[in-house]
Protein backbone atom coordinates (compact mmCIF):
# COMPACT_ATOMS: atom_id res chain seq x y z
CA UNK A 1 0.00 0.00 0.00
CA UNK A 2 1.32 3.45 -0.93
CA UNK A 3 1.83 5.78 2.03
CA UNK A 4 0.52 9.34 1.81
CA UNK A 5 3.04 10.80 4.24
CA UNK A 6 0.16 12.37 6.16
CA UNK A 7 -1.10 11.62 9.66
CA UNK A 8 -4.63 11.37 11.07
CA UNK A 9 -5.25 11.55 14.80
CA UNK A 10 -8.51 9.96 15.92
CA UNK A 11 -10.00 10.76 19.31
CA UNK A 12 -11.84 7.76 20.77
CA UNK A 13 -11.51 4.01 20.19
CA UNK A 14 -15.19 3.16 19.98
CA UNK A 15 -16.57 1.45 16.92
CA UNK A 16 -16.57 4.72 14.90
CA UNK A 17 -12.97 5.60 15.75
CA UNK A 18 -11.76 2.09 15.01
CA UNK A 19 -13.64 2.06 11.69
CA UNK A 20 -12.07 5.37 10.68
CA UNK A 21 -8.64 4.04 11.63
CA UNK A 22 -8.96 0.98 9.38
CA UNK A 23 -10.27 3.00 6.44
CA UNK A 24 -7.49 5.57 6.83
CA UNK A 25 -4.75 2.95 7.16
CA UNK A 26 -5.99 1.17 4.04
CA UNK A 27 -5.72 4.47 2.18
CA UNK A 28 -2.10 4.90 3.23
CA UNK A 29 -2.37 7.34 6.13
CA UNK A 30 -0.39 7.15 9.35
CA UNK A 31 -2.97 6.74 12.12
CA UNK A 32 -2.88 7.24 15.87
CA UNK A 33 -6.03 6.51 17.89
CA UNK A 34 -6.26 8.09 21.34
CA UNK A 35 -8.47 6.35 23.91
CA UNK A 36 -9.03 7.70 27.41
CA UNK A 37 -9.95 4.24 28.82
CA UNK A 38 -7.53 1.30 29.17
CA UNK A 39 -9.36 -0.73 26.52
CA UNK A 40 -11.11 -0.13 23.20
CA UNK A 41 -14.82 -0.25 22.53
CA UNK A 42 -16.39 2.77 24.20
CA UNK A 43 -20.02 1.81 24.76
CA UNK A 44 -19.39 -1.47 22.91
CA UNK A 45 -18.22 -3.00 26.15
CA UNK A 46 -18.29 -6.12 28.29
CA UNK A 47 -16.45 -6.91 31.50
CA UNK A 48 -15.59 -9.85 33.73
CA UNK A 49 -16.76 -10.51 37.27
CA UNK A 50 -15.35 -13.80 38.49
CA UNK A 51 -16.22 -16.52 35.96
CA UNK A 52 -18.96 -14.39 34.35
CA UNK A 53 -18.87 -11.87 31.50
CA UNK A 54 -21.47 -9.10 31.33
CA UNK A 55 -22.36 -7.34 28.07
CA UNK A 56 -23.73 -3.80 27.88
CA UNK A 57 -24.03 -3.17 24.15
CA UNK A 58 -24.66 -5.82 21.54
CA UNK A 59 -28.22 -7.07 21.07
CA UNK A 60 -27.83 -7.78 17.38
CA UNK A 61 -25.41 -6.81 14.61
CA UNK A 62 -26.92 -5.56 11.38
CA UNK A 63 -24.97 -7.16 8.55
CA UNK A 64 -24.47 -10.62 10.04
CA UNK A 65 -25.86 -12.37 6.94
CA UNK A 66 -23.14 -13.42 4.46
CA UNK A 67 -23.52 -11.59 1.17
CA UNK A 68 -25.82 -8.96 2.63
CA UNK A 69 -25.46 -5.24 1.97
CA UNK A 70 -24.06 -4.27 5.38
CA UNK A 71 -22.11 -7.49 5.66
CA UNK A 72 -19.98 -6.15 2.82
CA UNK A 73 -19.43 -2.92 4.75
CA UNK A 74 -18.14 -4.78 7.81
CA UNK A 75 -15.90 -6.84 5.54
CA UNK A 76 -14.28 -3.67 4.22
CA UNK A 77 -12.98 -3.31 7.76
CA UNK A 78 -12.45 -6.72 9.35
CA UNK A 79 -12.68 -10.42 8.64
CA UNK A 80 -16.26 -10.83 9.88
CA UNK A 81 -16.27 -14.52 8.96
CA UNK A 82 -14.14 -15.17 12.04
CA UNK A 83 -17.20 -14.45 14.20
CA UNK A 84 -19.91 -16.99 14.96
CA UNK A 85 -23.45 -15.64 14.78
CA UNK A 86 -26.62 -16.98 16.34
CA UNK A 87 -30.14 -15.98 15.31
CA UNK A 88 -32.55 -16.64 18.21
CA UNK A 89 -36.02 -17.58 17.02
CA UNK A 90 -37.57 -15.48 19.79
CA UNK A 91 -36.71 -11.77 20.03
CA UNK A 92 -38.44 -10.89 23.30
CA UNK A 93 -41.17 -12.28 25.56
CA UNK A 94 -43.49 -9.84 27.33
CA UNK A 95 -45.18 -11.03 30.52
CA UNK A 96 -47.51 -9.59 33.13
CA UNK A 97 -47.56 -10.62 36.77
CA UNK A 98 -50.96 -12.29 36.31
CA UNK A 99 -49.62 -14.70 33.69
CA UNK A 100 -50.42 -13.01 30.37
CA UNK A 101 -47.62 -13.31 27.80
CA UNK A 102 -46.70 -12.36 24.25
CA UNK A 103 -43.83 -13.88 22.29
CA UNK A 104 -42.29 -11.64 19.65
CA UNK A 105 -40.58 -13.99 17.19
CA UNK A 106 -37.83 -13.00 14.78
CA UNK A 107 -39.44 -15.05 11.99
CA UNK A 108 -42.33 -13.14 10.40
CA UNK A 109 -44.46 -16.28 9.83
CA UNK A 110 -44.12 -17.37 13.48
CA UNK A 111 -44.76 -13.82 14.67
CA UNK A 112 -47.90 -13.55 12.56
CA UNK A 113 -49.27 -16.80 13.94
CA UNK A 114 -48.53 -15.75 17.52
CA UNK A 115 -50.18 -12.35 17.14
CA UNK A 116 -53.30 -13.78 15.49
CA UNK A 117 -53.53 -16.40 18.24
CA UNK A 118 -53.43 -13.71 20.91
CA UNK A 119 -55.58 -11.09 19.25
CA UNK A 120 -57.63 -12.23 16.24
CA UNK A 121 -59.61 -8.98 16.39
CA UNK A 122 -56.40 -7.18 15.36
CA UNK A 123 -56.29 -9.08 12.07
CA UNK A 124 -56.07 -5.98 9.82
CA UNK A 125 -53.40 -4.23 11.91
CA UNK A 126 -51.41 -7.46 12.29
CA UNK A 127 -51.56 -8.13 8.55
CA UNK A 128 -50.27 -4.61 7.83
CA UNK A 129 -47.50 -4.99 10.44
CA UNK A 130 -46.26 -8.32 9.07
CA UNK A 131 -46.48 -7.01 5.50
CA UNK A 132 -44.29 -4.06 6.56
CA UNK A 133 -41.69 -6.41 8.06
CA UNK A 134 -41.51 -8.46 4.87
CA UNK A 135 -41.42 -5.38 2.65
CA UNK A 136 -38.66 -3.61 4.57
CA UNK A 137 -36.54 -6.74 4.31
CA UNK A 138 -35.95 -5.57 0.73
CA UNK A 139 -34.76 -2.10 1.84
CA UNK A 140 -31.05 -1.34 1.49
CA UNK A 141 -29.40 1.57 3.29
CA UNK A 142 -27.83 4.16 1.04
CA UNK A 143 -24.09 4.75 1.21
CA UNK A 144 -23.77 8.00 3.21
CA UNK A 145 -20.32 8.55 1.69
CA UNK A 146 -21.69 8.46 -1.83
CA UNK A 147 -23.62 10.95 -3.90
CA UNK A 148 -26.24 10.39 -6.55
CA UNK A 149 -23.78 8.65 -8.86
CA UNK A 150 -22.88 6.00 -6.28
CA UNK A 151 -26.42 5.55 -4.91
CA UNK A 152 -28.64 5.74 -7.97
CA UNK A 153 -29.03 1.96 -8.28
CA UNK A 154 -29.94 1.55 -4.60
CA UNK A 155 -32.37 4.45 -4.84
CA UNK A 156 -34.00 2.87 -7.88
CA UNK A 157 -34.21 -0.50 -6.14
CA UNK A 158 -35.71 1.10 -3.01
CA UNK A 159 -38.44 2.99 -4.89
CA UNK A 160 -41.18 0.40 -4.12
CA UNK A 161 -40.32 0.62 -0.41
CA UNK A 162 -40.27 4.42 -0.14
CA UNK A 163 -44.03 5.00 0.46
CA UNK A 164 -43.91 2.63 3.45
CA UNK A 165 -40.72 4.25 4.80
CA UNK A 166 -42.28 7.69 4.52
CA UNK A 167 -45.45 6.55 6.31
CA UNK A 168 -43.57 4.88 9.16
CA UNK A 169 -41.10 7.75 9.38
CA UNK A 170 -43.85 10.23 10.23
CA UNK A 171 -45.15 8.37 13.29
CA UNK A 172 -43.69 7.36 16.62
CA UNK A 173 -43.67 3.86 18.04
CA UNK A 174 -46.44 4.90 20.43
CA UNK A 175 -48.55 6.24 17.56
CA UNK A 176 -47.98 3.03 15.64
CA UNK A 177 -48.91 0.91 18.64
CA UNK A 178 -52.34 2.45 19.19
CA UNK A 179 -53.66 0.61 16.14
CA UNK A 180 -53.56 -2.65 18.12
CA UNK A 181 -56.31 -3.56 20.58
CA UNK A 182 -54.10 -6.13 22.32
CA UNK A 183 -52.52 -4.36 25.32
CA UNK A 184 -49.27 -6.33 25.25
CA UNK A 185 -48.65 -5.67 21.57
CA UNK A 186 -49.50 -2.00 22.04
CA UNK A 187 -47.13 -1.97 24.99
CA UNK A 188 -44.32 -3.47 22.87
CA UNK A 189 -44.26 -0.37 20.65
CA UNK A 190 -45.00 2.26 23.27
CA UNK A 191 -42.63 1.73 26.20
CA UNK A 192 -39.85 4.19 27.05
CA UNK A 193 -37.61 5.49 24.27
CA UNK A 194 -39.13 2.98 21.85
CA UNK A 195 -42.41 4.87 22.09
CA UNK A 196 -40.65 8.12 21.12
CA UNK A 197 -38.57 6.73 18.26
CA UNK A 198 -39.85 6.73 14.72
CA UNK A 199 -41.78 3.53 14.02
CA UNK A 200 -39.18 2.71 11.35
CA UNK A 201 -36.73 1.71 14.09
CA UNK A 202 -38.53 -1.36 15.40
CA UNK A 203 -40.17 -2.46 12.14
CA UNK A 204 -36.87 -2.26 10.27
CA UNK A 205 -35.07 -4.14 13.07
CA UNK A 206 -37.62 -6.95 12.87
CA UNK A 207 -37.28 -6.94 9.08
CA UNK A 208 -33.52 -7.52 9.39
CA UNK A 209 -34.10 -10.25 11.97
CA UNK A 210 -36.59 -11.95 9.66
CA UNK A 211 -33.90 -11.93 6.96
CA UNK A 212 -31.42 -13.35 9.53
CA UNK A 213 -29.28 -10.30 8.93
CA UNK A 214 -29.24 -9.11 12.56
CA UNK A 215 -27.63 -11.95 14.50
CA UNK A 216 -25.76 -11.90 17.79
CA UNK A 217 -22.04 -12.68 17.63
CA UNK A 218 -20.68 -15.09 20.21
CA UNK A 219 -18.40 -13.17 22.56
CA UNK A 220 -20.51 -10.02 22.30
CA UNK A 221 -19.33 -6.59 21.23
CA UNK A 222 -15.76 -7.13 22.41
CA UNK A 223 -15.38 -10.04 19.97
CA UNK A 224 -15.97 -7.53 17.17
CA UNK A 225 -13.75 -4.92 18.80
CA UNK A 226 -10.86 -7.41 19.00
CA UNK A 227 -11.04 -7.91 15.23
CA UNK A 228 -10.62 -4.15 14.78
CA UNK A 229 -7.68 -3.99 17.19
CA UNK A 230 -5.94 -6.82 15.36
CA UNK A 231 -6.58 -5.24 11.95
CA UNK A 232 -5.24 -1.84 13.05
CA UNK A 233 -2.12 -3.49 14.43
CA UNK A 234 -1.68 -5.51 11.23
CA UNK A 235 -1.94 -2.36 9.11
CA UNK A 236 0.64 -0.52 11.20
CA UNK A 237 -1.68 1.80 13.14
CA UNK A 238 -1.41 2.65 16.82
CA UNK A 239 -4.01 2.78 19.59
CA UNK A 240 -2.84 4.63 22.68
CA UNK A 241 -4.76 3.84 25.85
CA UNK A 242 -5.15 6.03 28.95
CA UNK A 243 -4.66 8.99 26.62
CA UNK A 244 -7.33 11.59 27.37
CA UNK A 245 -7.49 14.50 24.91
CA UNK A 246 -7.87 17.87 26.59
CA UNK A 247 -8.14 20.08 23.52
CA UNK A 248 -7.87 20.18 19.76
CA UNK A 249 -4.95 22.38 18.71
CA UNK A 250 -6.11 24.96 16.17
CA UNK A 251 -4.07 27.47 14.20
CA UNK A 252 -5.71 29.91 11.78
CA UNK A 253 -8.98 27.98 12.02
CA UNK A 254 -7.36 24.68 11.04
CA UNK A 255 -6.97 21.68 13.35
CA UNK A 256 -3.29 20.72 13.47
CA UNK A 257 -3.27 18.19 16.30
CA UNK A 258 -4.42 17.55 19.86
CA UNK A 259 -3.13 18.11 23.36
CA UNK A 260 -3.48 15.41 26.00
CA UNK A 261 -4.22 15.94 29.66
CA UNK A 262 -0.73 16.44 31.09
CA UNK A 263 0.38 18.68 28.24
CA UNK A 264 1.67 16.33 25.51
CA UNK A 265 0.99 17.75 22.04
CA UNK A 266 0.43 15.36 19.12
CA UNK A 267 0.63 16.99 15.68
CA UNK A 268 -1.51 15.77 12.79
CA UNK A 269 -2.59 16.72 9.30
CA UNK A 270 -6.18 15.81 10.15
CA UNK A 271 -8.09 15.40 13.41
CA UNK A 272 -11.19 13.21 13.69
CA UNK A 273 -13.26 13.11 16.85
CA UNK A 274 -15.16 9.90 17.50
CA UNK A 275 -15.53 11.01 21.11
CA UNK A 276 -18.57 12.50 22.81
CA UNK A 277 -20.05 15.22 20.61
CA UNK A 278 -20.81 17.75 23.34
CA UNK A 279 -17.36 17.39 24.93
CA UNK A 280 -15.70 17.73 21.53
CA UNK A 281 -17.57 20.86 20.47
CA UNK A 282 -17.78 22.69 23.80
CA UNK A 283 -14.71 21.47 25.71
CA UNK A 284 -12.01 20.33 23.28
CA UNK A 285 -12.83 23.23 20.95
CA UNK A 286 -14.13 25.63 23.65
CA UNK A 287 -17.38 26.24 21.74
CA UNK A 288 -15.57 28.38 19.17
CA UNK A 289 -16.92 26.64 16.08
CA UNK A 290 -20.68 26.52 16.48
CA UNK A 291 -23.56 28.11 14.64
CA UNK A 292 -27.27 28.39 15.41
CA UNK A 293 -27.96 24.94 13.99
CA UNK A 294 -25.43 23.25 16.30
CA UNK A 295 -26.61 25.27 19.32
CA UNK A 296 -30.18 24.23 18.56
CA UNK A 297 -29.23 20.53 18.31
CA UNK A 298 -27.57 20.48 21.72
CA UNK A 299 -30.25 22.65 23.29
CA UNK A 300 -33.35 20.98 21.86
CA UNK A 301 -32.65 17.52 20.40
CA UNK A 302 -33.49 14.62 22.69
CA UNK A 303 -30.95 11.98 23.63
CA UNK A 304 -31.46 8.33 24.43
CA UNK A 305 -31.75 7.74 28.16
CA UNK A 306 -28.81 6.63 30.23
CA UNK A 307 -29.18 3.45 32.28
CA UNK A 308 -28.45 1.41 35.34
CA UNK A 309 -27.37 -2.14 34.55
CA UNK A 310 -27.81 -4.85 37.14
CA UNK A 311 -25.77 -7.91 36.14
CA UNK A 312 -26.21 -11.28 37.79
CA UNK A 313 -24.09 -14.42 37.66
CA UNK A 314 -26.50 -17.28 38.27
CA UNK A 315 -25.50 -20.86 39.02
CA UNK A 316 -28.30 -22.38 36.96
CA UNK A 317 -28.81 -23.34 33.35
CA UNK A 318 -31.51 -20.92 32.17
CA UNK A 319 -31.66 -22.06 28.54
CA UNK A 320 -35.42 -22.56 28.96
CA UNK A 321 -35.80 -18.78 29.19
CA UNK A 322 -36.19 -16.42 26.20
CA UNK A 323 -33.14 -14.38 25.15
CA UNK A 324 -34.96 -11.27 26.37
CA UNK A 325 -37.85 -10.96 28.80
CA UNK A 326 -39.89 -7.90 29.77
CA UNK A 327 -41.91 -8.09 32.97
CA UNK A 328 -44.82 -5.64 33.28
CA UNK A 329 -45.21 -4.94 36.98
CA UNK A 330 -48.30 -4.23 39.06
CA UNK A 331 -46.22 -1.92 41.29
CA UNK A 332 -43.39 0.10 39.71
CA UNK A 333 -39.74 -0.18 40.70
CA UNK A 334 -38.16 3.03 42.02
CA UNK A 335 -34.84 3.57 40.27
CA UNK A 336 -34.05 7.06 41.57
CA UNK A 337 -36.02 10.09 42.79
CA UNK A 338 -37.23 10.92 39.26
CA UNK A 339 -37.54 7.42 37.78
CA UNK A 340 -40.16 4.74 38.43
CA UNK A 341 -40.51 1.84 36.00
CA UNK A 342 -43.38 -0.54 35.39
CA UNK A 343 -41.31 -2.48 32.88
CA UNK A 344 -38.19 -4.41 33.90
CA UNK A 345 -36.29 -6.24 31.18
CA UNK A 346 -33.85 -9.15 31.43
CA UNK A 347 -31.35 -10.68 29.00
CA UNK A 348 -30.52 -14.33 29.57
CA UNK A 349 -27.17 -14.99 27.85
CA UNK A 350 -27.62 -18.78 27.70
CA UNK A 351 -26.95 -18.55 23.94
CA UNK A 352 -23.37 -17.32 24.56
CA UNK A 353 -21.25 -20.08 26.12
CA UNK A 354 -18.32 -17.68 26.61
CA UNK A 355 -20.20 -15.62 29.21
CA UNK A 356 -20.59 -18.21 31.97
CA UNK A 357 -19.30 -21.66 32.99
CA UNK A 358 -21.27 -24.69 31.82
CA UNK A 359 -24.57 -25.03 33.67
CA UNK A 360 -24.55 -21.34 34.67
CA UNK A 361 -25.95 -18.16 33.07
CA UNK A 362 -25.05 -14.48 32.86
CA UNK A 363 -28.17 -12.32 33.22
CA UNK A 364 -28.48 -8.55 32.83
CA UNK A 365 -31.22 -6.01 33.45
CA UNK A 366 -31.03 -2.51 31.99
CA UNK A 367 -33.09 0.19 33.70
CA UNK A 368 -33.34 3.45 31.72
CA UNK A 369 -33.12 6.78 33.54
CA UNK A 370 -32.68 10.40 32.53
CA UNK A 371 -31.62 11.39 36.04
CA UNK A 372 -27.93 10.97 35.28
CA UNK A 373 -26.99 13.95 37.49
CA UNK A 374 -28.36 12.20 40.57
CA UNK A 375 -26.06 9.22 40.08
CA UNK A 376 -23.03 11.32 39.11
CA UNK A 377 -23.44 13.55 42.18
CA UNK A 378 -23.81 10.55 44.47
CA UNK A 379 -20.67 8.94 43.14
CA UNK A 380 -18.65 12.15 43.42
CA UNK A 381 -19.91 13.45 46.75
CA UNK A 382 -21.67 10.68 48.69
CA UNK A 383 -19.92 7.40 47.90
CA UNK A 384 -21.48 5.51 50.81
CA UNK A 385 -25.01 6.46 49.72
CA UNK A 386 -24.03 5.69 46.11
CA UNK A 387 -23.14 2.12 47.08
CA UNK A 388 -26.33 1.80 49.13
CA UNK A 389 -28.48 3.01 46.22
CA UNK A 390 -26.84 0.56 43.84
CA UNK A 391 -27.55 -2.27 46.30
CA UNK A 392 -31.17 -1.12 46.68
CA UNK A 393 -31.77 -1.12 42.92
CA UNK A 394 -30.10 -4.53 42.56
CA UNK A 395 -32.37 -5.93 45.27
CA UNK A 396 -35.45 -4.56 43.49
CA UNK A 397 -34.39 -6.26 40.25
CA UNK A 398 -33.70 -9.55 42.04
CA UNK A 399 -37.19 -9.41 43.58
CA UNK A 400 -38.72 -9.05 40.12
CA UNK A 401 -36.69 -12.01 38.83
CA UNK A 402 -37.58 -14.07 41.88
CA UNK A 403 -41.28 -13.69 41.09
CA UNK A 404 -40.60 -14.97 37.59
CA UNK A 405 -38.24 -17.75 38.69
CA UNK A 406 -39.01 -18.70 42.30
CA UNK A 407 -35.90 -19.74 44.22
CA UNK A 408 -33.46 -18.03 41.84
CA UNK A 409 -32.10 -15.79 44.60
CA UNK A 410 -30.42 -18.78 46.26
CA UNK A 411 -28.21 -19.47 43.23
CA UNK A 412 -27.07 -15.90 42.48
CA UNK A 413 -23.27 -15.95 42.76
CA UNK A 414 -22.36 -12.49 41.44
CA UNK A 415 -24.15 -9.12 41.60
CA UNK A 416 -22.68 -6.16 39.71
CA UNK A 417 -24.25 -2.72 39.22
CA UNK A 418 -23.20 0.02 36.80
CA UNK A 419 -24.90 3.43 36.67
CA UNK A 420 -24.96 6.55 34.48
CA UNK A 421 -21.94 7.69 36.51
CA UNK A 422 -20.12 4.56 35.32
CA UNK A 423 -21.01 5.32 31.70
CA UNK A 424 -19.78 8.90 32.02
CA UNK A 425 -16.60 7.83 33.82
CA UNK A 426 -15.53 5.29 31.19
CA UNK A 427 -16.92 6.75 27.96
CA UNK A 428 -17.48 10.47 28.62
CA UNK A 429 -20.86 10.31 26.87
CA UNK A 430 -22.97 13.41 27.44
CA UNK A 431 -25.74 12.73 29.97
CA UNK A 432 -24.53 9.12 30.03
CA UNK A 433 -26.62 8.55 26.88
CA UNK A 434 -26.73 5.04 25.44
CA UNK A 435 -26.88 5.88 21.75
CA UNK A 436 -26.73 9.63 21.28
CA UNK A 437 -29.71 11.28 19.61
CA UNK A 438 -33.14 9.70 19.38
CA UNK A 439 -34.32 9.19 15.80
CA UNK A 440 -37.64 11.00 16.06
CA UNK A 441 -40.63 11.01 13.67
CA UNK A 442 -40.21 13.27 10.66
CA UNK A 443 -36.44 13.52 11.01
CA UNK A 444 -35.63 11.04 8.24
CA UNK A 445 -32.46 8.94 8.08
CA UNK A 446 -30.06 11.75 7.23
CA UNK A 447 -27.00 12.24 9.49
CA UNK A 448 -26.00 15.57 10.97
CA UNK A 449 -23.08 17.49 9.35
CA UNK A 450 -19.69 15.93 10.11
CA UNK A 451 -17.76 19.21 9.99
CA UNK A 452 -17.92 22.37 12.06
CA UNK A 453 -18.40 25.85 10.58
CA UNK A 454 -15.17 27.69 9.75
CA UNK A 455 -12.93 24.90 11.07
CA UNK A 456 -10.70 23.10 8.56
CA UNK A 457 -8.78 19.85 9.01
CA UNK A 458 -11.42 18.36 11.32
CA UNK A 459 -14.28 15.83 11.21
CA UNK A 460 -16.85 14.45 13.65
CA UNK A 461 -18.01 10.83 13.45
CA UNK A 462 -20.04 8.38 15.53
CA UNK A 463 -23.40 8.27 17.26
CA UNK A 464 -23.57 12.05 17.77
CA UNK A 465 -23.59 12.45 13.97
CA UNK A 466 -26.01 9.60 13.16
CA UNK A 467 -29.34 9.83 15.05
CA UNK A 468 -30.40 6.40 16.21
CA UNK A 469 -26.83 5.41 17.07
CA UNK A 470 -25.96 1.73 17.24
CA UNK A 471 -22.90 -0.10 15.94
CA UNK A 472 -23.66 0.58 12.23
CA UNK A 473 -23.27 4.32 12.87
CA UNK A 474 -19.53 3.63 13.25
CA UNK A 475 -18.67 2.68 9.67
CA UNK A 476 -21.57 4.73 8.29
CA UNK A 477 -20.02 7.94 9.62
CA UNK A 478 -16.35 6.93 9.40
CA UNK A 479 -16.45 6.06 5.70
CA UNK A 480 -17.67 9.51 4.50
CA UNK A 481 -15.10 11.29 6.68
CA UNK A 482 -12.12 9.31 5.37
CA UNK A 483 -13.45 9.50 1.83
CA UNK A 484 -13.67 13.31 2.11
CA UNK A 485 -10.13 13.51 3.50
CA UNK A 486 -8.85 11.37 0.63
CA UNK A 487 -10.58 13.64 -1.87
CA UNK A 488 -8.99 16.73 -0.33
CA UNK A 489 -5.55 15.08 -0.38
CA UNK A 490 -5.99 13.60 -3.89
CA UNK A 491 -5.60 10.10 -2.46
CA UNK A 492 -7.53 7.19 -4.02
CA UNK A 493 -10.23 5.77 -1.74
CA UNK A 494 -10.03 2.14 -2.83
CA UNK A 495 -11.12 -0.29 -0.12
CA UNK A 496 -11.02 -4.01 -0.78
CA UNK A 497 -13.08 -6.32 1.43
CA UNK A 498 -11.31 -8.60 3.87
CA UNK A 499 -11.08 -12.17 2.58
CA UNK A 500 -11.46 -14.97 5.10
CA UNK A 501 -8.48 -17.29 5.15
CA UNK A 502 -8.73 -20.62 6.93
CA UNK A 503 -5.87 -21.48 9.23
CA UNK A 504 -3.79 -24.34 7.82
CA UNK A 505 -4.67 -27.68 9.37
CA UNK A 506 -2.20 -29.07 11.90
CA UNK A 507 -1.36 -32.64 11.03
Image (tube, rainbow, N blue to C red):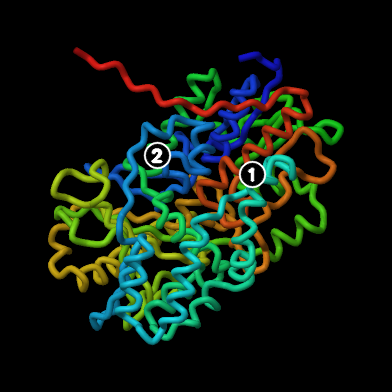
Q: Distance between the residues labelled 1 and 2?
A: 26 Å
Name the quadrant containing residue 342: bottom left
Of residue 375 and residue 325, the one placed in the foreground of this image is 325
Residue 369 is situated, as x and y percent measured from the top left of the image, at 48, 66
From the image, tell me which residue sits under label 2: 222
Measured as percent of width and height from the top left, residue 251 is found at: 82, 31
Whether residues under marks 1 and 2 lie with C-beta atoms below 8 angstroms apart, the answer is: no
Q: Which residue is drawn at 33% across and 51% down?
A: 87
Which residue is at 13% across, 49% downward? 359
Left or right placement of residue 96 versus residue 31 in this view: left
Mark positioned earlier in the residue sequence (1 or 2): 1
Between 182 and 300, the residue placed more toward the observer is 182
The residue that disc 1 covers is 143
Q: Is residue 20 above or below residue 86?
A: above
Q: Is mark 1 on a helix, strand or loop?
A: loop
Is 193 drawn above or below residue 1 in the view shown?
Answer: below
Q: In this view, does 478 lie above or below 488?
A: below
Residue closer to the observer: 292 or 168: 168
Amino acid sequence: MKRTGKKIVIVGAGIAGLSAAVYALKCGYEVEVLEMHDMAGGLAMSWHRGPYTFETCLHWLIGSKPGGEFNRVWKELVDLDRLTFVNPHEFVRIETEDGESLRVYTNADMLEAELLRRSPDDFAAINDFIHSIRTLGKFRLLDPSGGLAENWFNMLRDLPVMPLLMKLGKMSGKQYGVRFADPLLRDFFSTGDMGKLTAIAMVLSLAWMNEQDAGYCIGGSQALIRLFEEKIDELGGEIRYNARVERVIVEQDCAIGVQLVGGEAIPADWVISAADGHATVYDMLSGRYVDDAIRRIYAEAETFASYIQVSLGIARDLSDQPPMLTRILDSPVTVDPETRLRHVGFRFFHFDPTFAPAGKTAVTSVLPTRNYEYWANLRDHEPQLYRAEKARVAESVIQVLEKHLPGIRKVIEVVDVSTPATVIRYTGNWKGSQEGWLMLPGAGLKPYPNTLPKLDGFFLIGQWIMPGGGLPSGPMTARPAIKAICKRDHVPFEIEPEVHREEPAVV
